Amino acid sequence: MLTKRIIACMDVRDGQVVKGVQFQQLRHAGDPAELAQRYNVEGIDEVVVLDITATLESRQALARTISAVAHRIFLPLTVGGGIRKEDDAAAAVDAGADKVSINTAALSRPDLITTLARRYGSQAVIVAIDAKRRGNGFAVYVRSGTSDAARDAVEWAREAESRGAGEILLTSMDRDGTRSGFDCEMTAAVANAVNIPVIASGGAGDLDHFYDVFTSGRADAALAASIFHYDDTSVSELKKHLNARNIPVRM
Amino acid sequence: MIALIDYGAGNLTSVRKALTALGADFATPARPEDCAQFSALIVPGVGNFAATAALVGPWRDAIAETVRGGTPLLGICLGMQWLFEGSDEAPEVLGLGVLEGRVTRLRGDAEAGLKIPHVGWNALDFRGTARILSGLEPHAHVYFTHSYAAPVTDACVAATTHGDTFASVVERDNIFGVQFHPEKSSDAGLQIIRNFLAVTRGLSAAARGAEAEC
C-alpha cells in the first residue's frame, strides 16, 4: 500500500536554514546538509529546499546547498524558490534536485509547467500554490505571499495538472508558521479536484495535525519545517504515532 | 567498470551519486560497440517510454548482444520497462524484449485515493528469493514515481500493489530490473544497488579465476 509521505522543508537563506512565522520573523535553524542527514536517519520520506531570498547572488549559494544536501541523503529532493525560467530549473536539477517547485513563474507563464514536464517528466514538476481563505473559496497569492493572483486555488490546481504538473504543493498562508493545524478543508478541496498527489503545507503543530490532514484533508503527503527543525517533534515519533492510528507510513 | 547508459531520458545525477557513494567504477559509453568492454550495464531513465526510441537500432543491438554473453544488466524505472517487449505508452517503440510481456498503464482509483502517477513509498512483496533482494527486510519500502508498470511474470521476484499488482523487481539469470528508484530509496535502495554490484564483482572474479586455470 502506498504510504503517506512526511516531507521536511528547509527554508534556506545564504546557505543556512531559517523559518518564519507567516512568512516573517526569520529564525536561524542550522546547516541544511546536517539537518537533512538527521532527517534521513529519523526516516523522513522526502526533503524540500526552498530558497527564500532567490536573488542572483543566492543562486550560486543555492547550487552549493543543493549539492551538499544531495551528497548526504538518498531521498527525493525538491528545490523551489525563485525558479522563473527553464535555466533556473536546469541549474537546480544539475546540482542534484530531483524535482523543482515553481510558484510565481507558473502563474505568470503557465507554459513553463509544460516546458519543464516535457524536459524532465511530470514527476519532476511541482506546482506550489500559496493560498488563503476568502469567502467560500481559496485565494492564490504570489511573490512570497505579497501579491494577489486573482485566481482560486482549486481552479488553478486543475489547470496546473492539465499543463503537466506532477504534484501540487499547497500552502495555507493563514496557517503557515502558526502551528494551529493544516487547513484540512482547503487541502481536501484541492485533493478532490485533481488526480495528482497533493502535499499539504502550513500549520503543522502537533502529531494529530498530520493525522487530520491525511484523513479529512485527503492529503497524499504533508510538509512541515519548524516542527522538525527545533527538535520539538522527531520524524520517527510522528511516524510511530501515525502508524498506531492506522495511517500507512514508511517505518 | 560499469556502463551507465545515457540516452537522454532524465537526469542521471542521483544514479551517479549513489554509485560513487558505493565505490563503484562507472562510465558512460559513447558508442554502442563500447558496451562489450564493460563488466555490467545499467539502463536508468525516467519519463515517457518514447524516450527509449533513442536506444532503438545500434544501442539496442549492442546491449542485447552484451547481455546474451552473460553480462549483468540492471534496468531502473523506465530502464526496467524497456527490458520487456514494449509499452502501451509508446506502442510503436520496441523494448529490448529479454523479458516477455508488455508494460501497461496503472488504472488507479480516484475514489479510493489511488492516484496516477503512483508517487511515493510503497512496499515490496517478495516472491521467492533473489540475489537482488539480498539483505532487505521483507516488505521494505522504496520510492516509486511512474504511471506504467510491468506485468507479474516468472521473472518477477517482488511485486507491489497500487490498485493493480505489478512487477516492482525482476530477476532472470543476470538480468535485473527495478520499477522504483533505488538511488532515491535511502538504505533499502542502496542495498539493492550494492547487491547488483556484488553480482557483478562475483562474475568478474569468477571470470578471472577461469582465465587463471587456463
Image: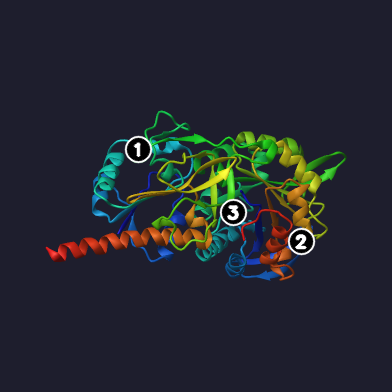
Between A2 and B51, the one lying in front of the other is A2
Q: Are marks 1 and 3 in contact (CB under 8 Å)?
A: no
Q: Picture coordinates of residue A182 (x, y %)? A: 78, 53
Q: Picture coordinates of residue A219 (x, y %)? A: 71, 47
Residue A21, can we see it? no
Q: Are marks 2 and 3 in contact (CB under 8 Å)?
A: no
Q: Earlier in the sequence, mark 2 or mark 3?
A: 3
Q: What crowding class fits label 1: few (fewer than 14 Cα within 10 Å), some (14-19), or many (20 or more)?
A: some
**Amino acid carrying mark 1 in the image:** Gly
Q: Picture coordinates of residue A66 (x, y %)? A: 55, 60
Give me the C-alpha separation between circle 1 and circle 3: 34 Å
Position of residue B68 in the picture relative to residue B75 (left or right): left
Q: What crowding class fits label 2: few (fewer than 14 Cα within 10 Å), some (14-19), or many (20 or more)?
A: some
Task: Locate residue B118: give its quadrant.
Answer: top right
Position of residue A156 in the picture relative to residue A2 (left or right): right
Position of residue A141 in the picture relative to residue A65 (left or right): right
Specify the farthest residue to the right.
Answer: A135
Residue to which mark 2 is pinned: A207
Residue to which mark 1 is pinned: B97
Q: Residue at x 85, y 42 (%)?
A: A134
Do callouts 2 and 3 point to residues on the same chain? yes
**Amino acid carrying mark 2 in the image:** Leu
Residue A138, can we see it? yes
Position of residue A231 in the picture relative to residue B123 (left or right): right
Q: Picture coordinates of residue A122 (x, y %)? A: 56, 41
Element class at badge 2: helix
| Chain ID of residue with mark 1 | B
Residue to which mark 3 is pinned: A78
Between A196 and A134, the one lying in front of the other is A196
Task: Name above or below for residue A240 compared with residue B63.
Answer: below
Q: What crowding class fits label 3: few (fewer than 14 Cα within 10 Å), some (14-19), or many (20 or more)?
A: many
